[in-house]
Image: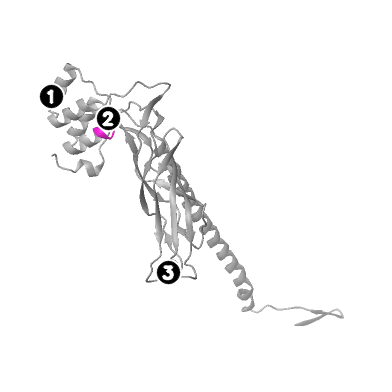
């Protein structure tokens, strides 16, 4: 629109009612996108924080030392509804510090502790006194260690000499003491890794075990290994072993370790699954 004022000519632009929303719409869209991005970032940070907290809690839980199993613990477990078999298994799998005096035995009988549990308590090994907070323990030769692959292996990816990592599946205990912890790292080495040859020789993947970390940080030598081989019929070009596959290995030679001494704490609380088991 042109306006004439005092001989001067001015040109002004009159905005229509339809032009304003067209200009504001991109701004609103940008604001909406920024809001969504901020919300997404907040969610991701929350998830990351929770995952980190869980990982820290798990690592702290794994570091909790064993505790002594004592007379009162046995009485409390039986009163809570644990089966005789479960209590005996607890005795076998725990470092025990039972009072076996005549007075204590009479107190156990008064508490209606079954005869089989009393026998397991009497047969529990006497552990040596801790020295500077640790108990020397001997891991015998050929002690079973169950492990799981921490990574996938493939003849197309790894070459001979590659270091393979495993995790220990379950605690290894000697006289109730945890000498090798669940989740401890074990190592192996690839001896052979080759794809199917042009002459028709099958693909092959083979490794042997090297060592595993004990409770005191020592590396305990291991023996054993495993292999994967291609089929003569199917003629696979490569073979693999998947992450999470389980294997058995054994300690090589006897080795003394210094296990952290158990602590004395409140009686062990049974897990829900154990509490529902009927007495046997």
Q: What element carries label 3?
A: loop
Q: Distance between the residues labelled 3 and 2?
A: 56 Å
Mark 1 and mark 2 lie on one chain; the one further toward the N terminus is 1
Asked whether the beta carbons under mark 1 and mark 3 sit within 8 Å of each other, the answer is: no
Callout 1: 10 Å neighbours few (<14), some, many (20+)? few
Report the number of numbered marks: 3
Which residue is outermost to the right? 7
Pair 3/2: label in front: 3
Front residue of 149 and 234? 234
Front residue of 98 and 257? 257
Q: Is residue 135 left or right of residue 74?
A: right
Mark 1 and mark 3 lie on one chain; the one further toward the N terminus is 1
Mark 3 and mark 2 lie on one chain; the one further toward the N terminus is 3
Provide residue 253's location: percent of width, then percent of height: 39, 36
Q: Residue 267 carries which label?
A: 2
- Magenta span includes 94: yes
Provide residue 54's location: percent of width, then percent of height: 43, 45
Q: Is residue 4 visible?
A: yes
Q: Which region shows up in magenta? A: 91-95
Residue sitting at 18 percent across and 33 percent down?
Answer: 78
Front residue of 128 and 77? 128
């Amino acid at each position: 629109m042109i306006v004439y004022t005092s001989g001067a000519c001015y040109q002004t632009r009159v905005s229509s009612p339809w032009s304003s929303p067209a200009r504001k719409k991109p701004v609103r869209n940008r604001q909406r996108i920024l809001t969504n991005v901020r919300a997404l970032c907040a969610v991701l940070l929350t998830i990351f924080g929770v995952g980190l907290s869980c990982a820290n809690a798990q690592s702290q839980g794994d570091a909790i030392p064993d505790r002594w199993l004592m007379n009162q613990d046995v009485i409390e477990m039986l009163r809570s509804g644990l089966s005789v078999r479960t209590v005996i298994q607890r005795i076998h799998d725990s470092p025990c510090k039972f009072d076996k005096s005549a007075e204590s035995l009479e107190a156990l009988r008064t508490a209606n502790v079954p005869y089989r549990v009393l026998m397991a308590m009497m047969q529990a090994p006497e552990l040596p006194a801790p020295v500077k907070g640790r108990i020397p323990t001997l891991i015998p030769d050929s002690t079973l260690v169950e492990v799981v692959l921490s990574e996938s292996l493939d003849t197309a990816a790894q070459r001979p000499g590659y270091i393979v990592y495993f995790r220990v599946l379950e605690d290894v205990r000697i006289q109730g003491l945890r000498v090798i912890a669940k989740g401890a790292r074990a190592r192996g080495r690839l001896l052979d890794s080759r794809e199917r040859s042009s002459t028709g020789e099958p693909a092959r993947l083979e490794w042997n075990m090297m060592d595993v970390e004990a409770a005191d940080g020592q590396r305990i030598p291991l023996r054993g290994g495993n292999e994967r081989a291609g089929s003569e019929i199917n003629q696979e070009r490569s073979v693999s072993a998947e992450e999470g596959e389980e294997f058995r290995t054994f300690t090589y030679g006897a080795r003394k370790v210094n296990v952290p001494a158990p602590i004395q704490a409140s009686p062990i609380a049974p897990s829900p699954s154990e509490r529902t088991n009927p007495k046997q």
